[in-house]
Image (spheres, rainbow, N blue to C red):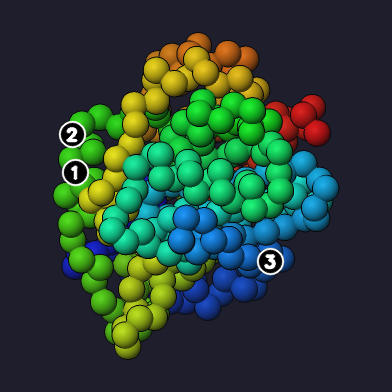
Amino acid sequence: MGTFDNTRSRNALKGKVFADTIRAVSSTLRFGCERARKRTVKVGGLRLNVLEWGIAGRPPLCFLHGGSAHAHWFDLVAPAFVDRFHTIALDQRGHGESDWATPPAYATENFAADLLGVIDAFGWRQVALVGHSMGGHNAMSFSAWHPDRVSALVIVDSRPVIPADRLDRLRTRGQRTLRPYPSAEAAAQSFRLLPRETNAEPAFFAHLGRAGIVQRDGHWAYRFDPASNSARAPVDAWPLLERITAPTLIARGELSPVLPPEMAEKLRVAIRAATLVEIPASYHHLVLDNPGAFVQALDRFLAPLI
């Protein structure tokens, strides 16, 4: 999952270096959000934010981010597909610029209902789903519950069930209030990942930190609902996998501790017509660590399906 550091521990990127990197972003990389159209879709009383590329009539493609993250996680991936697909990256409920659920409602079923509402709002009969971490768990569950609505499924370093001890830590972390920061720079500076290991480009890392904050009540804070962690209620998706009928690609990071090779193979066997690829030189956040290799693998998988 992606998350932010609410503690006072020092970030690996020193403040001045991080600030200099933020200022240099515009001259080093081009991000998908620069070409995207922003759209709001109302589902079940919540306003859900969408980054949209391409034109109606092309095959639909939807990217789903991980926990405590946001749609910009795919800013180095989505541009490779916008000329062939009607592409969206969704801020899932409680994340990014989408509404927080009140009272908190962050079960897999809630995320799946939102996704169905978004698909219906776009008028899509079927969609190719690409989900990372929490987004991958939501995508595989949705694909089992609504197999007729999914043309292809890509599970990105995601496991079907969260171990009880990890879920307990996640819920405990979600009980912390969001720390207020006096400036955007101070808030972005504290950005980190969980797991922390990454090979991400510093400029992209800085971009994600800046895209993940918002000004509220005179201070800066992070764009996610802490209750999306404290109230997280993920299903055990292992029993659901046999119901998935869409062609499926499982992508794991070569160095990832989240989806070890043995579990990735078990996941491949559990889903009919699934294939497994390993993205080199990448940890859990492989869409950040090696976006080029991931784009190549995703392109090879999706091309025959167009």
Query: Can the viewer see residue 152?
Result: no
Residue 246 placement: quadrant:
top right
Image disc number at residue 165? 2
Residue contact at pointers 2 and 3, CB within 8 angstroms = no
Whether residues under marks 1 and 2 lie with C-beta atoms below 8 angstroms apart, the answer is: yes
Q: Is residue 231 left or right of residue 276?
A: left
Of the residues tagged 2 and 3, which is closer to the observer?
A: 3
- Density class for disc 2 (Cα within 10 Å; few <14, some 14-19, many ≥20) is few
Report the residue marked by disc 3: 37
Local SS, label 2: helix
* Residue at the image point whose x is 16% and y is 49% from the top: 172
Q: Which residue is mark 1?
A: 169
Q: Position of residue 20 (x, y in %)?
A: 47, 76
| Numbered label attached to residue 99 | none
**CA distance for labels 1 and 2:** 6 Å
Residue type at mark 3 is: Arg
Residue 104: image x %, image y %? 29, 55
